[in-house]
Image (cartoon, rainbow, N blue to C red):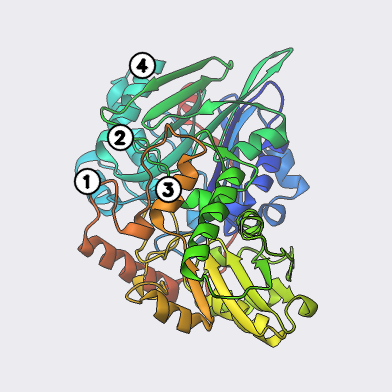
Amino acid sequence: MCGILGVVATTPVNQLLYDGLQVLQHRGQDAAGIATAERNVFHLHKGPGMVRDVFRTRNMRNLAGNWGIGHCRYPTAGSAYNAAEAQPFYVNSPFGIMLAHNGNLTNSEALKEEMFRQDLRHVNTNSDSEVLLNVLAHELQAAARGAQLDADTVFTAVAGVHRRVRGAYAVVAMIAGFGLLAFRDPFGIRPLIIGRNVMPAGTEYLVASESVALDTLGFSFLRDVEPGEAVLIDVNGRFNSRQCATHTLHAPCIFEYVYLARPDSLIDGISVYDTRVKMGEFLADKIRHTLPHVHIDTVIPIPDSSRPAAMELASRLNLPYREGFVKNRYIGRTFIMPGQAKRRKNVRQKLNAISQEFRGKNVLLVDDSIVRGTTSREIVQMAREAGARKVYFASAAPPVRFPNVYGIDMPSRDELIAFGRTDEEICAEIGADALVYQDLEALKAAVRACNPAITCFEASCFDGVYITGDVTVEYLSSVENARGNASKTNEDNDGAQLDLNLITQSEAENG
């Protein structure tokens, strides 16, 4: 899970990209980067940390140009922060390309070997995004055959990427002197939305991970990028698109609606907020049937993602709804913090209980999901310390029993509290008096109710079904091993910011 953004405007885009990344910050707090284009020169600045920490006035001044891309990084598949892996990535040959990627490739190791032996390309980092960039560059070179680029050539290259690459990927890329390219994998696993802004000097376009970036920056929603589709906006603002995949299946990641996306976003025609309200409706029905004799005094959400579900649940069960936890807004999302010890420490810093809402009461705590169980265990203990008589726990999502390999940091089965445990054992692990999980079919129904046209979802972390069809037990084991090794080797790494002005190959050849 990362946040990506691409803009083609009629005025300088540095501030637009910065503001857009700010509202996509929830998608990644590990590193951030912006690249802009001015004539045939790329300007790039990237570094570790949150957007507000990476960019200073002097950096923003250097990011000149009317089109560009941005990225906020959340490391997946075990890669802790490495200065060389901050995005966007750049390659000079054949045309000069900057690329930012959200997702995770499942065949990146095979592609590395293939590129080294057949494409004669070298990858410098462990990032699958750099692999994707080099595959795109090679396919562009093959499609162009020494000629100048045109839209047909670019779309042919994207079709070549789809044939070779497996996994989840939403991409924004700049091709020097040509335009902004955006495309989405044939399953549409990770989101990508297009916005438009009509100005006196011409039409501006924005492509982003979530529609909230469009709202904030004053762009009107145009549509989602379709699975397998590529969108091309040239430097003059001309818009073109084409379906580049032979076979497609619209199967968005269901965890986007559970937790990852902001509630005010619209993804694939589905309101994230409305789905979370629906989750509360279905969860209330299950509690009514599974815990009919349990007396509950109050319903309390775990802020923030579970709030819509908790409010609807309380309304359906005719129970009082209370805010029992105060959240420290200056602590990042614990789910995307690397390391169990750091997550555990930050739970107490992040939340504080309002004791009068717990003292002497039987409370039902509602969370969006339970992944590792660290947060849930600490919160149940906090409720007891605040004086709760009984602590019941409800999850708006089903048990997370399987690793996710499509861009969410759930690669290790041993870290998932639900892996190999029954619901009763999980309840005991988190210290609750009772535990209720949402059923998977109910979760799908909650999301589908907001857009019946979406009939399939990527839900591998709940059901173990990997929709790309290429994920094996051996692959999962290799990812887990890589994650463990990366955690050890990167534990003490200090990141360095990178600020570059890159002259493209075409400009060098033109003198």
Q: Does residue 198 lie above or below 295 as drawn?
A: above
Q: Does residue 496 lie above or below 20 as drawn?
A: below
Q: Nearer the viewer, residue 103 or 220?
A: 220
Query: Does residue 148 appear to the left or right of 139 in the view shown?
Result: right
Q: Pointer 4: what residue?
A: 152
Q: Pointer 3: what residue?
A: 444
Looking at the image, tell me whether mark 2 or mark 4 is earlier in sequence order.
4
Query: Does residue 303 appear to the left or right of 439 in the view shown?
Result: right
The alpha-carbon separation of the residues under discs 1 and 4 comes to: 25 Å
Residue sitting at the far right: 356
Whole-percent x and y of residue 74?
52, 56
Q: Nearer the viewer, residue 225 or 296?
A: 296
Q: Mark 1 is on which residue type?
A: Glu
- Crowding near the residue tagged with mark 3, few <14, some 14–19, many ≥20 C-alpha atoms within 10 Å: some
**Helix, strand or loop for disc 1:** helix
Residue sitting at the far front: 293
Q: Mark 4 is on which residue type?
A: Asp
* Marks 3,2: beta carbons within 8 A: no
Q: Residue at x 70, y 75 (%)?
A: 349
**Residue 86 in sight in this render:** no
Q: Pointer 1: what residue?
A: 114
